[in-house]
Amino acid sequence: MIRTRTTAVVGGAALLAVAGGALAVGTQPTIAEALGVPTAAATATPGLAGTALARAQAQATATTAQTVLATANHKTDTAVLERRLDQLDHTGDLSSAAITSRISSTVDAAQAVATASAVQDKRDADTAAAAAAAAKQAAAAAQRAAAEQAAAAAAARALAAGNTVAGAKATASALAASRYGWGSAQFQCLDSLWTKESGWNYQAVNANGGATGIPQALPGSKMATIAADWRTNATTQITWGLQYISASYGTPCAAWAHSQASNFY
């Protein structure tokens, strides 16, 4: 857990402050001033002097140190500060100098805890930020993978549909009209031609000569001029077949007439 740290104030002066994850510790001339406890030389406090004043300072120190403990990162080792606080609670028979010594060691321990806590807070924040960034990247990667899988599945479905007899005929009719301006009469000739040649089966292979695919290209590798998937894609075969008919016979009906006369085209 990352705690939001505030400046610990006793009697108007700051002991410790954390700003933007970095610890700022002021340098004060005396322990009492560091804790915000007025000294006898600075602002006189009626009725407090000597050991009584030292004990008041000890109490203020304990309050400030407890605030540091309460706001420390849970991963921070606070054992030394807790011992110093315990010692500061037992000053009944101590002299003013001895109490002041305990105050000083408590302040040092509190400063050490605050510094270590601020460092740990920064580490925790950096770790959390890195984890959030990694999670964001992982989510984006998963989203891209899902989109790619969906696109691949859609492409596979489209290929499968286009490879059926009905799908191949629909593709051939559309390409014949859009690329060559051949209407329904020419398509009827094309349908007759390729029904005779392959039955519109993109996997058809002539056992005698090795002619391949819907247009019965010989050899089938000629269709690679259209695309490398000529063995598995009816659209690739049809695109090549229409191109061949246009270049060799001009129209499907001319190719069909030649096929009827010669039994090949």
Image (cartoon, rainbow, N blue to C red):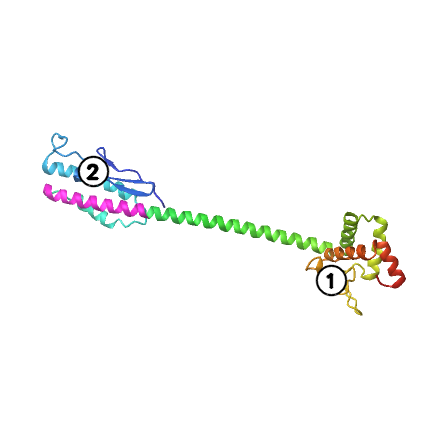
Residue at image x 50%, y 51%? 138
Q: Nearer the viewer, mark 2 or mark 1?
A: 1
Q: Quadrant of residue 219?
A: bottom right
Task: Kindly give the residue lying farthest to the right in the view shown.
Answer: 261
Residue at image x 77%, y 49%? 179
Q: Main secondary structure of the magenta part?
A: helix
For disc 2, the marked residue is 35
Image quarter hosting the C terminus: bottom right
In the rendered image, residue 90, in percent from the top left (x then y), is placed at 16, 44
Judged from the image, the secondary structure of the residue bearing numbered disc 2 is helix
Q: Is residue 12 above or below residue 193?
A: above
Segment colored magenta: 94-119
For disc 1, the marked residue is 222
Query: Amino acid type of disc 2?
Result: Leu
Q: Is residue 21 above or below residue 249?
A: above
- Residue 91 visible in the displayed image: no
Q: Examine the structure image and report whether residue 47 is included in the region drawn in magenta.
A: no
In the rendered image, residue 52, in percent from the top left (x then y), is placed at 12, 36
Q: Is residue 13 left or right of residue 148?
A: left
